[in-house]
Image (spheres, helix red, strand yellow):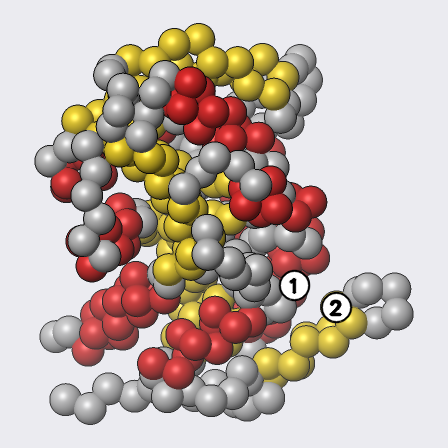
Amino acid sequence: MKISKPNIIFGDSNLNFFKSLLKIFNIKINYIKIEKFKDNEYKIQFLKKFNEKIIFILQSLSNPIHDNLINLFLIIDSLKKICIKKIYLIIPYFCYSRQDKIFNENSSISIKLISNLFDFFNVNKIITLDPHSSNFECCFNTPLKILKSTSLFVNDIVKNNISFDIIVSPDIGGVLRAKNLANYLNLELVIIDKRRPISNYIKIFCIIGNVEFKKCIVVDDIIDTGNSIIEVTNFLFFNKINTVIVYITHSIFSEKSFIKIYNSKINKLIVTDTINFNYFNDKIKIITTKYLFIEEIKKIILEKYEI
């Protein structure tokens, strides 16, 4: 059975990643023109008539977050106006997933507000990777497919024949993520009791497990300022760890915090390409997530042809 090329368009974020993904489907052009007026308002224009009534939109909701959100909402709204029946969103990094609770009296639950906006557009499915919140799925009425980066990390470790003794969760909230990786690699799990009394400040209380003279992998979903992972690394070396390799899904790197990582005791940092990042050196390595999303696109295309 011959399957036609999917209709895939992408927004204004992470352009290199999206272009490399489209190459797999032999799609050479983004059939959407995105312009900005002098006051930064967006104007959206489609460059072809979509005969198929199924379309995929690629957009990572990283910095500038609100530009990328509005950009995406305008694209969806424009597609609705030309009667596209099924819209699937590929969102590698989903903003506001860290704000899943009320932080103080009368404050908004930010991810719930964002989810309500997506629910309004009534898209068919949102496909994303490693959202921070364990409550993420509960906030949405829109169907979700949440992908995990664990298999990518395992493949990289096996491919490079890297030997380790333990997997470390840098906090209690990341235990499930670290446990999944530990199970794949049949390694011991160590947990750090780290708490955040105020934003961008952490306090480490204790370590659960033995790290002395061992090689470890620390796994987490987001690196932002880098302060937290550096503090964890320093704490591990204080407890006589031998080697610290860090695997992170989303590399936000606020205020060029990758420079702090480069100057830290971290032996190597491996991040994915869900957020645009072009700073390469011998300490920071990037692995691609595009094949995870390609497989999901293929599944949806094949479902259309099922009898």
Which residue sits at x=33%, y=25%? 241
Give the residue drawn at x 40%, y 46%: 268
Quadrant for the C terminus in the image: bottom left
Is residue 146 rendered to the left or right of residue 269?
left
How many labels, in total?
2
Kindly report the distance in space between the C-alpha atoms of the residues bearing marks 2 and 1.
7 Å
Closer to the camera in the image, 307 or 104:
104
Q: Which mark is residue 71?
A: 1
Please report the residue visible at 43 percent of the width from the left and 33 percent of the height from the top: 133
**Residue 195 higher or lower than 70, as above or below:** above
Using the image, determine if residue 62 lies above or below residue 26.
Answer: above
Q: Is residue 252 left or right of residue 133?
A: right
Task: Tell me the quarter of the picture where residue 182 sits.
Answer: top left
Q: Under tag 1, what secondary structure?
A: helix
Residue receiving disc 2: 42
Is residue 157 in sight in this rendering? yes
Q: CB under 8 Å between callouts 2 and 1?
A: yes
Residue at horizontal 15 percent and vertical 74 percent from the top: 306
Amino acid bearing label 2: Tyr
Q: Where is residue 213 in the image (x, y as percent from the top left)?
A: 26, 24
Residue 204, how many percent across, how many down? 47, 13
**Number of residues whose C-alpha sits closer than 10 Å to that of mark 2, classed few (under 14), some (14–19) or many (20 or more):** some
Residue 124 can be seen in this image: no
Instruction: Choose the circle earlier in sequence order: 2 or 1.
Output: 2
Q: In the current view of this chain or complex, which residue is farthest to the top?
A: 205
Residue 64, horizontal then vertical, whole percent: 68, 54
The amino acid beneath tag 1 is Asn
Rendered position, 190 above or below 117: above
| Secondary structure of the residue carrying numbered label 2 | strand
**Are there few (<14), some (14-19), or many (20+) residues within 10 Å of tag 1?**
many
